[in-house]
Amino acid sequence: MVLPAEYAWLEPVLVAAVVVFVIDLIGNSITFSNRFANALATAVVFAVIFGALVYYGYARVSIEITTTPSASAPTVQ
């Protein structure tokens, strides 16, 4: 992890932004003359790349929720 712990949520957002930017560049280069075809090509390329990332476990975000207080938690009186 590159960022401090309090900004851990920002890293997947930045990675996703870079991935979407590259995918949009690919979609634009495939069909640069038609807006509808450009949007369709970008969506298809995104679906393929995002599906591969999820399948191989690279797009995994885990959030841990605890419902019981830990032993070191301060007590409220």
Image (cartoon, rainbow, N blue to C red):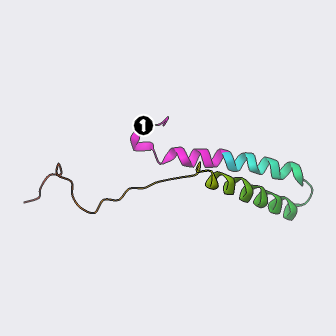
Q: How many marks?
A: 1
On the rendered structure, is 40 left or right of 56? right
User: Please, is residue 3 above or below residue 63 in the view?
Assistant: above
The residue sitting at 11% across, 58% down in the picture is: 76
Magenta-colored span? 1-18
Amino acid, disc 1: Pro
On the rendered structure, is 28 left or right of 20? right
The image quadrant where one finds the C terminus is bottom left
- Considering the numbered disc 1 on the image, is that residue within a helix, a strand or a loop? loop
The residue sitting at 52% across, 44% down in the picture is: 11
On the rendered structure, is 71 left or right of 21? left
Magenta region includes residue 41: no
As drawn, the residue found furthest toward the left would be 77
What kind of secondary structure does the magenta stretch mostly adopt? helix
The residue sitting at 35% across, 59% down in the picture is: 65
User: Please, is residue 2 above or below residue 16 in the view?
Assistant: above
Q: Quadrant of residue 22?
A: top right
Q: Position of residue 37 (x, y in %)?
A: 87, 62
As drawn, the residue found furthest toward the front would be 56
Residue wearing tag 1: 4
* Mark 1 Cα-neighbour bin, 10 Å: few <14, some 14–19, many ≥20: few
Q: Position of residue 38 (x, y in %)?
A: 84, 58
Magenta region includes residue 6: yes
Q: Position of residue 20 (x, y in %)?
A: 69, 50
Q: Quadrant of residue 48?
A: bottom right
On the rendered structure, is 9 left or right of 52? left
